[in-house]
Image: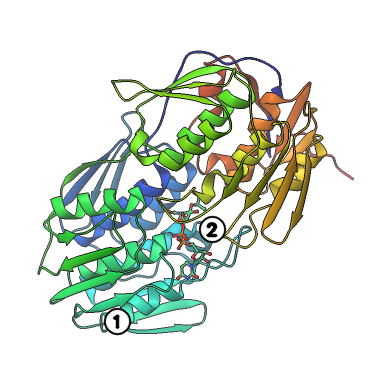
Amino acid sequence: MDKLVIQGGKPLHGKVPISGAKNSALVLLAGALLAPGESVITNVPNLADVGVISEVLARIGVRVMMDLTTHTIRVDATDLTDTPPPYDLVTKMRASFFVLGPILARLGYARIPLPGGCSIGSRPVDLHLKGLRSLGAKVIIEHGYVEAQADKLIGGPVYLDYPSVGATETIMMAACLAEGTTVIDNCAQEPEIVDLAEMLIKMGARIVGAGTQTITVEGVSQLHGTVHDCIPDRIEAGTFMVAAAVTRSRLTLTKVRADHMQAVISKLQEAGVGICVEPNGDITVDGTGEFHPIDLRTQPFPGFPTDLQSQFMTLLALVPGTSMVTETVFENRFMHVDELQRMGANIKTEGNCAVIQGVEALTGAPVKATDLRAGAAMILAGLAARGETTIGSIHHIDRGYEDIVGKLSAVGAQISRAQRKEVLV
Ligand code: EPZ
């Protein structure tokens, strides 16, 4: 197993290019299944998760041509089949579940492994299934699979008890080929939903309201392929903004969308981090000023994103005073706290609340990535800490950050990937 080795305390400087959004690319690839013919998706990040969903598509009759040197994936779903994707692939990468809606809508039948939970929570899919049932599908769960059947999906009203990103995407995709009108109420408003809707509209879908709490879809009989450019990754961008703050550096992010990051920018500014959105869209971050404690509460978009909660906690661990973080989206997203405490952080948790007393400095230590975003938080802690930090289980990080070692090294960080010596006991 690989590990990361970081010598902390190095200031960062220069420009960091932000890659395409993982949480958009994965669902765009699923959305391409709604049409026979070829779709081309550009600005696709080179990530382990993208590799997994591409393998899932290839196993269900889809021709997938990846050229990650140009960050482009060509998908031809003409010969899409209702063969269930491999159990291990779907349970390994939950976003594979996104293929359910498109396969059902195109073929009238789909059998997909239940994705199951992960370390941050139980991650149920009841809202996905409720939505498909509202469109007239017969949906059962048996032997660990979701089986959905509908000769023809019929548009109708769908109310989401929680603005679930995945459920909104599943229902919006299925509704594109339903008969009649579907209105999804209390839906998610994330930029990734808007990106998916924009691609589907280019494919011939009739969608209004993406990015608001109500999406209306007018079903059509068939869609066609298209070319679509994936939006930049706002979570990767936020991670690098925190990197500038914790290393007390100035850093510029390029290929980034400030309009996707209002909550993140506001909370950084409240903490004393300087943010300047340049006329060309680049974002310059100034972490050299005086920091202040803040209170953070994760919420669905446009609230503060849960995917940046752990990274912000690393920053707050170094901010003098008392800060508070409340995680309202997932039930177990504080696993980075134990690892930060190994490095000297002063954090107490009670349920979904964490109280952070800022300390003068963190000290390097052997830690591990417990999940994708917690792993990012540990990298940030290593960049700020005195001495050497080693981070194990970095396969979690490779799922969601393209070439993070290369990008950080290019702006002055002392970070490398090393073979972890397995201690034979
Ligand atoms: C997407 O997950 C993202 N993943 C997550 O990013 C992100 O944290 C999350 O949205 C929230 O923004 C992808 O897009 C691939 P949800 P998703 O459905 O769709 C509950 C990362 O680090 N819920 O909005 O699974 C659920 O348990 C990942 O990049 C139900 O109860 O998130 C959770 O508490 C992590 N029933 C809450 O809603 C359902 O049917 C939010 O989940 C679905 C969800």
Residue that label 1 marks: 134
Instruction: Identify the residue shown where x is 57% and y is 59%.
Output: 328
Question: What amino acid is at disc 1?
Answer: Ser
Q: Up-down: is 218 above or below 363?
A: below
The label on residue 230 is: none
Percent position of residue 165, x then y: 40, 60
How far across and down, in percent of the image, does residue 357 sit? Answer: 76, 39
Q: Is residue 11 above or below residue 141?
A: above
- Considering depth in this image, is 44 or 412 the residue closer to the camera? 412
Asked if the residue at label 2 sits under 8 Å from ligand 1, the reply is no
Quadrant where the image shows the C terminus:
top right
Q: How many marks?
A: 2
42 sits left or right of 375 in the view: left
- The residue positioned 73% from the left and 31% from the top of the image is 320
Marks 2 and 1, how far apart in space?
Answer: 28 Å
Q: Where is residue 338 in the image (x, y as percent from the top left)?
A: 77, 47
Give residue 88's position: percent from left, percent from top.
Answer: 52, 62
Furthest residue to the right?
Answer: 425
Q: Which mark is residue 92?
A: 2
Q: Is residue 254 above or below residue 195?
A: above
> First in sequence: mark 2 or mark 1?
2
Q: Is mark 2 on a helix, strand or loop?
A: helix
Q: Is disc 1 placed on a helix, strand or loop?
A: helix
Q: Residue 109, can we see it?
A: no
Q: Which amino acid does label 2 sit on?
A: Lys
Q: Quadrant of residue 234?
A: top left
Quadrant that contains the N terminus: top right
